[in-house]
Image (cartoon, rainbow, N blue to C red):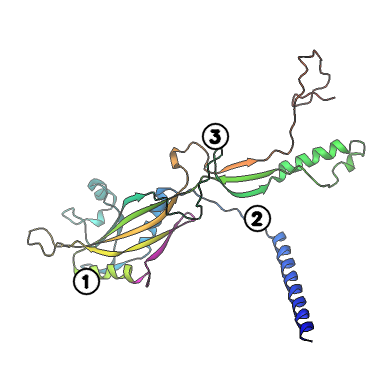
Amino acid sequence: MATDFTKNKQKATDAENADFRTKQREEAKGAPLQEIHFMPSTLETVDFAVYEWLTGFNLHTNTNEGFKPVPVIWAIPERAFQMKNNKDMHDKSETLKLPLISIERESIDKNPSNRGDAWGNIPPVNDYQRGSITVARRIDQKTSAKFARADAWRKNTDSGPNQRNVPKTNKKVVYQTVTMPMPVYIDIVYSINLRTEYQEQMNDLVVPFITNPGGINYQKVSKDGHNYDAFIQQSFLQENNIASMGEEERTYKTKINLKVLGYLMGADKNQESPKVVIRENAVTISFPRERVMTGDIPQEIDKRGFYRE
């Protein structure tokens, strides 16, 4: 009895799985295809991803003007550009107002041992279009329909005009294969510099970088559909000058290093080949008949210039 019960239970489970798979196939047939706009990954893409991640902290602290947001700037641009671009960041003596957060890209390391999803090196196709990795494959409905219609008219010439376009199995299906360049993985180190006038302000800015990831140092930065793994380094370097007895202004400065595992696709503006390559397969091969050597004069030539008997 136990064996019969187990068999019946297994049959019921198999029937449920078959019904579920049938339902999935029916839903997939009615689901429309979705086009994903895929932008290339460049150094500027990684820079913007890190900058937007940093501005997403929305850091505030107490200043002489109240509880204000702390501005984030990319590196330190030229002084003339600073004065014209954002006058609110300078005081009457044309010096930067603190607190301030700046970010700078320090180094790029191409380490072959650090790879992402694509481990093996796939050489590009040996033509002017290049392309290494196949990302999509679709049917060219318009071109395939032309081949099907041409075959139907050729085979059903005597069947009348109403029977020439009867649906039949089309063996000449044109596929479009989409390929892209091989991603090159790199390690990029960014330095985040926090500069304040008071210790209390520095505490307000440093604490979110310590507590936000929780017990780990992992972060994810994103831009244009690309996701990059980022790691906040464990050392927070203090570069204060409060112990100095000189006449310069006392400031607090903390340097935080961020290591990003990024990847590049293509040569950006210096790339001659397309960023995304679309190729079509051949469904028929035709050889023209050369009649010049034998002296034959073609009687019928189609629009393509081929001789037909």
Decide which of tag 1 and tag 3 comes sooner along the chain: 3
In the figure, residue 99 lies in which quadrant? bottom left
Label ID, residue 200: 1
What amino acid does circle 1 point to?
Answer: Glu
Spatial CA distance of label 3 from label 2 is 30 Å
Neighbours of disc 2 within 10 Å: few (<14), some (14-19), many (20+): few
Residue topped by disc 2? 33
Q: Secondary structure at mark 2?
A: loop
Task: Look at the image and say whether residue 223 sits in the magenta stretch.
Answer: yes
Residue topped by disc 3? 128
Neighbours of disc 1 within 10 Å: few (<14), some (14-19), many (20+): few
Q: Is residue 129 left or right of residue 218?
A: right
What amino acid does circle 2 point to?
Answer: Leu
Q: Secondary structure at mark 3?
A: loop
Decide which of tag 3 and tag 2 comes sooner along the chain: 2
Numbered-mark total: 3
Magenta span: 211-228
Q: Nearer the viewer, residue 161 or 276?
A: 276
